[in-house]
Amino acid sequence: MTRNQVKGGIALFSLALLGAGALWASLRTGRADNFDIREKPGGVPARSSPPSIQNTNKAPTPAPPSMVWIPGGEFSMGTEDPTDMLCGGPDPLPDARPIHRVYLDGFFMDANEVTNDQFDKFVRDTGYLTVAERKPRAEDFPGASPDALVPGSAVFTPTDAPVSLDDFLKWWRYVPGANWRHPAGPGSNLEGRGNYPVVQVAYEDAAAYAKWAGRRLPTEAEWEFAARGGLSGQPYAWGAELKPGNKWMANTYQGRFPMKDTGEDGFAGLAPVSKFPPNGYGLYDMAGNVWEWCADWYRPDYYEQLLKVGGVARNPAGPSESFDPNEPGVPKRVQRGGSYLCTDQYCARYLVGARGRGEPSTASNHLGFRCVLSK
């Protein structure tokens, strides 16, 4: 859903909730299958694809504070239909195919999602006001009541009873006063949460922080290469099994969605950064916790475009313009990694090759970012 889809008091948040944690396929079909999440012997076999070929060059300089070196190289980008996998979810992820070969130069990447403390320093230094803190403009919301034009953002709100999963307005609401300082609304704050990922940031907020920090947002290809951590053809950022050694490897949703996250992974809701093991490159939370903005415009057919060109795509930076057939005329940016709301019942886009998207003025309490730096 986007800002121009609904009217009145709930009209002012642009969730493109498919990038921000839901699936259009689920919304269309209302599927909410109760997938078996028990581990099976041997886990999930690696998908067939040519192996990754990592560059052997070392970092040109010592890694900047809080960043790690990603060597780059050639890899297979995308994922096969995961619906036959353990916890593969109900969506075949058609926009993550065809799998294609990509080459990337090396780069540095934030080891963690940008935290509240880091974002606070940026705001203090610059006086920056995020999109969620600004009063919406009447011209952007024709027909909206002037009383509804108040700053705020989208907040996930658990339901009291089971609901059909065909209408995400049942668990998302626009909350006046919700922003990065008050992620769930005016009654919430950041006390004791300096090491949590900053949320309620729109694309331009993330880009502004990156520019201030002398960095940039990752391309989608950079993000996926880094998330794979040197592994080839695996469904998860950590390998083949959902729970190796019966241990949760990411902050996702356990329990009946959207009623109650039981916190079997150690966290009900958002988690501080670095609470789960890093991947092979030393990156934390490349699956779950919060969705992360990427620099690319979103098109579901972009991988097809690359494959038609032939050969290995070198440092692809995304299409020149966005198109989402579900919302023609509403531009979207790519989001990656899934969030703490990912569940096999509704959204399995924490899988390493899966894609998400969001309208650039989107902000919500499960959406953040991390930065990269070219060598």
Image (spheres, grey):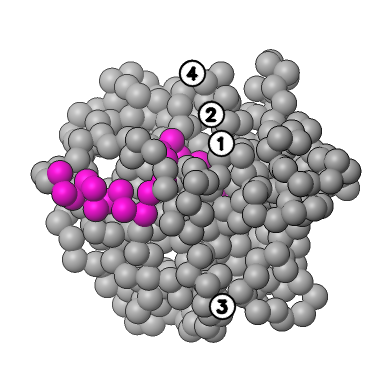
Q: Above or below — where is 48 with respect to 368? A: below
> Which of the two labelled residues, at mark 2 and mark 3, occupies the earlier sequence position?
3
Residue drawn at (16%, 49%), measured in percent from left and top? 308
Q: Is residue 177 left or right of residue 126?
A: right
Q: Which image quadrant is residue 354 in?
A: bottom left
Q: Where 125 falls versus 26 (above or below)?
A: above
Q: Nearer the viewer, residue 119 or 163?
A: 163
Residue 55 shown left or right of residue 302 in the figure: left
Which amino acid type is marked by label 2? Ala
**C-alpha distance separating marks 3 and 1:** 29 Å
Residue, x 18% and y 60% (percent of image)?
49
The residue carrying pointer 4 sits among few (fewer than 14), some (14 to 19) or many (20 or more) residues within 10 Å by Cα, namely few
Q: Viewer-nearest of labels 4 and 1?
A: 1
Residue 336 placed where, x, y %? 46, 49
- The residue under label 4 is 214
Q: What residue would you read off at disc 2? A: 207
Q: Are marks 2 and 3 in contact (CB under 8 Å)?
A: no
Q: Amino acid at mark 3?
A: Gly
Residue at image mark 1: 203
Q: CA distance from mark 4 to mark 1?
A: 17 Å
Q: Position of residue 87 (x, y in %)?
A: 45, 75
Q: Which residue in the structure is indicated by mark 3?
A: 30
Tell me if residue 24 can be seen. yes
Q: In terms of secondary structure, where does tag 2 sit? A: helix
